[in-house]
Image: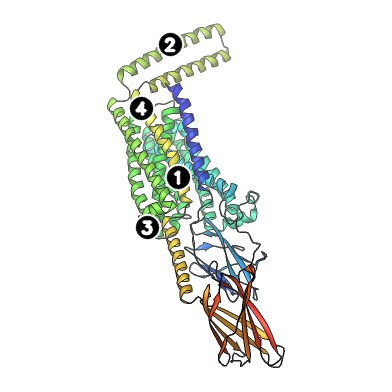
Amino acid sequence: MTQTIAPRVRVLVLLLLAATGLLLAGAGPASAHAALTGSDPQQGTVVDKAPDQISLTFSEKVAMSDGSLRVLDPKGKRVDQGKASNVSGTTYAVQLHSGLPDGTYTVTYQVVSEDSHPVAGAYTFSIGAPSRTSVSVSDQTAGGGVVGWLYGFGRYVSYAGFAVMIGGAAFVLACWQRGSGVRAVQRTVVSGWLALTAATLLLLLLRGSYTSTGSVGDIFDLNLLGQVLQTKTGAALVSRLLLLAAAALFIAVLFGAYDKREAEEKRDLTFGLAIGGTVVAAGLAASWAMAEHASTGLQTGIAMPVDVIHLLAVAAWLGGLCTLLVTLYRADTPIERSAVSRFSTLAFGSVLTLVATGIYQSWRQLGSWSAFTETRYGQLLLVKIGLVALLVGIAWISRRWTARLGDAGVLTTEKSEEADAEGTAVGSAVREKEHVGAKAAGADSARAAQLARQQAAVDAARRKRQRDADPDRFGLRRSVLAEAGVAVVLLAVTTVLTQTEPGRTEQEAKAATSSSASSSSSSADSSAAVTLDMPFDTGGEDGKGVVRVDLNPARVGANEMHVYVERPNGRAFDVPEVKVSFTLEAKNIGPLPVTPDRITTGHWSAAGVQLPMAGDWKIAVTVRTSDIDQTTVSKNAQIG
């Protein structure tokens, strides 16, 4: 029976790993955890004068470096001045060069949110009137590509390694102290340590490229690595490596000095190892809490300790489950049923802890019931809750098998006696064969070694038959295997969840964007007038001034127009004549002449100015300051 199960186990593991890969691949670029909630100028607006600066407002604080916020002219040339600065709260601004010409400008940003995830995007605005631009913003993504996939994989391996290492050590100390001498258990815990250490080093190398260029060639850029070490995430990863050195010492004692102690001596050492191991495990869990979701947003002073407890409960449950699975399938020494019962109690307590901390984390990250279905974070959380419920259901079945094991004792007496008798008979035959062989071969050491190997194989086969003879134990092995399979997928969903923008943040960003758009629309409805200021010089004596055109509501159909003519000092300029024309060059419409009526000195007006089509209209104004001195100036305006 065992021979037929082993291939199935391998196939199941491969399928689960494939599912994990699909989940990670489907995650795509890391979702932004800080959302852009406002900008000045706003996206798609047309401003009359060139602004002195560009400001962006995010839903939380972000980290910026040189080039994080760039402003490009229609030809793709940068027109911003250096590094962006924090203006107030979560608003950041960058200064612009003076005297920018009319046209469409592109604003690009790539920053790192306070919970360590990269955020990128771009939008356009126009000065004077829209124009063509050669700037492409299609590559404005963060955390994608090969580097993004590797970073996501590294996160998954780090979570898995943490759970296996911490859960395996807790399983030995709390449930099965004899397991410290079992080679399969030792390999499992050490593999968890190696996986977490390798993944942490990988994340440290990938971090610079992941949050900036996304290029594989920048993975080993020492300048980027130096910048990473100065960030909160870099400090967390370095702290994790230092704690892993302490964890290595703990593992060495657990599987070295601790295993060699007698039962009475182990009791005192168990307490010390439990305290030291808890401190190291809590420190490792804090390296996630201090740099990710728990470190920003609401109630960080409560959220970070809760996150640490949540991670420790996950490790105790899933890591212990993995160790139990390895013990049931790979260990030569059968595990006592009392140890399985103790783990069942530990797992139950871990589940209760996960439920309590999970409810708090869900409230903190979602904020409303609607976020469960309206945000990607909420939808993934529903999947996670479903997987946890499935895992608890399978665990309940495992507890039933464990209870049956407890009722039956260590092994049924009849099966135990049969197994022992069989083992004794086989052992006697081998020893007799060994004795005969020794007489025949004398001091032949090679023959003696071969016979010793045969005896070891016979003993191992006897223990294996003894272990597999119990149907209750076989049922427990199958249910634990199913639990482990669900746990692999659950861990993958959790990894993707940590890379997804929290539902509360997503909804707040949408609300802020909608409010901004509504405010802009309301403002446009109430005062959508276009105002154009155009300096002129007719060339004659006293021929300089400024003409201002106000067009309201600047829409297709009838419009009201006011023209103001002023001297350079701002006083009204009494000119003999003003003429205006409108031309839509893209559609070959116009010029449409308009002769306004003089209202008072320097003020001219015309009602019912008809504009037949929306577009980028050229408004030309002819100003005559004397019988022979006149000039025409023009500017474009977007008519909607």
**Where residue 527 appears, x then y in whole percent?**
48, 77
Quick one: label 1 or label 3, which is nearer the N terminus? 3
Report helix, strand or loop for mark 3.
loop
165 vs 204, left or right, is left
Which quadrant would residue 211 be assigned to in this image?
A: bottom right
Please tell me the numbered disc located at residue 367: 3
Quick one: label 1 or label 2, which is nearer the N terminus? 2
| For discs 4 and 2, the disc positioned in front in the rendered view | 4
Which quadrant would residue 613 be assigned to in this image?
A: bottom right
Is residue 32 on the magenta stretch?
yes
247 vs 616, left or right, is left
Quick one: label 3 or label 4, which is nearer the N terminus? 3
**Where residue 36 appears, x then y in whole percent?**
50, 63
Q: Residues within 10 Å of mark 2 (few under 14, many from 20)?
A: few
Picture quarter with the N terminus: top left
Residue extending furthest left?
A: 407
Please tell me the numbered disc located at residue 475: 4
Q: CA distance from mark 1 to mark 4?
A: 28 Å
| For discs 1 and 4, the disc positioned in front in the rendered view | 1
| For discs 3 and 4, the disc positioned in front in the rendered view | 3
Residue position for label 1: 493
- The amino acid type, in three-letter code, at marker 2 is Ser
Q: CA distance from mark 3 to mark 4?
A: 42 Å
Stretch in magenta: 28-36
Q: Residues within 10 Å of mark 1 (few under 14, many from 20)?
A: many
**Where residue 628 appears, x then y in whole percent?**
71, 91
- The amino acid type, in three-letter code, at marker 1 is Val
Q: CA distance from mark 1 to mark 3?
A: 21 Å
